[in-house]
């Protein structure tokens, strides 16, 4: 009931929008659009904007969203892990210490994914002629040969460089999947421990 | 204290505020996306054509977009923090008012049932609604209200309300 409610602990709209925007891009780029397709590259830039905004928000955002509210602290994270094992519960206004580490890990991973992706793809490709949706989402050309990428690349020794970027991109993305898996597991665990607020705090409305 | 609510106005007010913050936040997100694409475009243009009027104007627009993102973020933060402060202030005020009500009810020596009825009445419930909420006859509620008015030295619901508002308004002026 409303007049027994404590001050509402929910994420602010920037956190929610960037969180679900990032989730949407990852799902889209992993499952829906083809690797290296035009849509994939645009989604990547979209992702870059969301992450940039979230990191800016970490500096100048609302109290719970700022980095200072959840500094990366492995010692506190260990303590939190012990609390979980011992069945102790503690309320955290922002991320809990383990969740904070996860947030930084996800961001670091996403930055590598974004950086390597932009290094491969260059600027968002111009969509000049009317194209069909299938063209937009179909896989981009492989780097081997043709030099189609000269258009975006700096020319020269890009062949080898792009291969490295591709490797990095793939490794980082796979690491990202593992982190997301752990993230969802962590949320499930915290929900089981402390109740639905863990999830509802990130949902629209958030009550 | 967990009493029934006259929930309509309050719920609407809160959602409107939430929506306003979300709208501003949404605009900030769209601006951020636009800024990134524009910035990427400007960088490519600089790499390809070097500096020129075209690039300078593009850079200016990109800068304006970025400034808009930062300003929008600051504004969103202001709105979020203000909403949080308002909620906290409301919680504190609510607690204080509840204490004040309880103190007055005790001072007037209202019975437990009368206190409940007085509270519901102050919250704006009509006699019929109170009787439904408390599962008693309307006549009982009316009798209890009469007793409440007598004990508090007023003759109507308005008088009862003014017993509390009088204090608040004086406090506000002082």
Image (spheres, coloured by chain):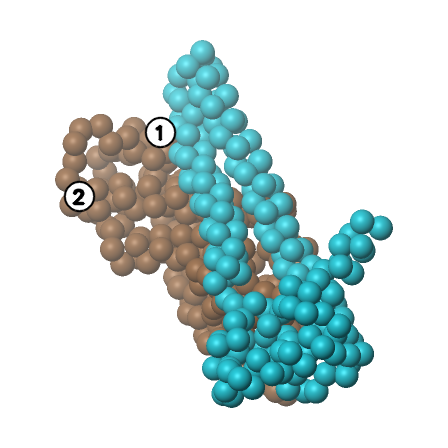
Mark 2 and mark 1 lie on one chain; the one further toward the N terminus is 2
Q: Position of residue B124 (x, y in %)?
A: 56, 67
Q: Chain of mark 2?
A: A
Q: Is residue A123 above or below residue A167?
A: above
In the image: residue B77, left or right of residue B43:
right
What residue occupies the far right of the structure in this picture?
Answer: B174
In the image: residue A191, left or right of residue B105:
left
**Which label number is shown at residue A172?**
none
Dividing the picture into quadrants, the one containing residue A96 is bottom right
In the image: residue A151, left or right of residue B78:
left
Give the brown chain's letter: A
| Residue placed most toward the observer, B114 or A34 | B114
**Which label number is shown at residue A133?**
2
Q: Quadrant of the N terminus of chain A?
A: bottom right
Give the cyan chain's letter: B
Disc 2 and disc 1 on one polypeptide chain: yes
Which residue matches tag 1? A155
How much space separates mark 2 and mark 1, taking CA atoms? 29 Å
């Amino acid at each position: 009931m409303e007049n027994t409610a404590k001050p509402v602990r929910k994420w602010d709209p920037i956190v929610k929008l960037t969180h679900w925007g990032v989730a949407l891009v990852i799902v889209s780029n992993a499952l829906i659009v083809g690797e290296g397709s035009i849509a994939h590259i645009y989604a990547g830039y979209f992702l870059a904007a969301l992450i940039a905004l979230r990191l800016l928000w970490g500096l100048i955002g609302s109290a719970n969203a700022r980095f200072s509210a959840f500094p990366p602290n492995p010692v506190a994270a260990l303590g939190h892990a012990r609390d979980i094992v011992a069945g102790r519960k503690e309320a955290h206004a922002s991320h809990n210490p383990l969740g904070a580490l996860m947030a930084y890990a996800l961001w670091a991973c996403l930055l590598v994914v974004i950086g390597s992706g932009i290094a491969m793809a260059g600027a968002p490709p111009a969509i000049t002629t009317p194209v069909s949706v299938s063209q937009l989402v179909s896989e981009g050309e492989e780097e081997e040969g043709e030099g189609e990428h000269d258009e975006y690349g700096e020319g020269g020794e890009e062949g080898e460089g792009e291969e490295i970027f591709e490797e990095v991109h793939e490794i980082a993305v796979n690491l990202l999947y593992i982190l997301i898996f752990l993230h969802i597991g962590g949320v499930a665990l915290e929900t089981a421990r402390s109740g639905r607020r863990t999830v509802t705090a990130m949902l629209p409305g958030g009550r | 204290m967990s009493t029934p609510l006259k929930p309509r106005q309050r719920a609407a007010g809160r959602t409107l505020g939430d929506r306003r913050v979300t709208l501003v936040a949404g605009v900030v997100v769209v601006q951020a996306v636009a800024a990134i694409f524009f910035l990427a475009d400007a960088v490519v243009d600089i790499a390809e054509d070097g500096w020129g009027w075209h690039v300078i104007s593009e850079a200016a627009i990109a800068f304006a977009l970025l400034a808009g993102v930062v300003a929008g973020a600051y504004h969103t933060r202001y709105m979020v923090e203000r909403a949080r402060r308002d909620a906290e202030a409301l919680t504190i005020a609510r607690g204080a008012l509840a204490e004040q009500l309880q103190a007055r009810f005790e001072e007037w020596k209202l019975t437990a049932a009368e206190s409940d009825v007085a509270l519901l009445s102050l919250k704006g419930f009509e006699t019929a609604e109170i009787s439904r909420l408390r599962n008693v006859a309307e006549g009982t509620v009316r009798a209890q209200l009469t007793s409440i008015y007598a004990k508090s030295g007023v003759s109507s619901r308005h008088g009862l309300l003014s017993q509390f508002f009088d204090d608040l308004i004086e406090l506000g002026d002082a």
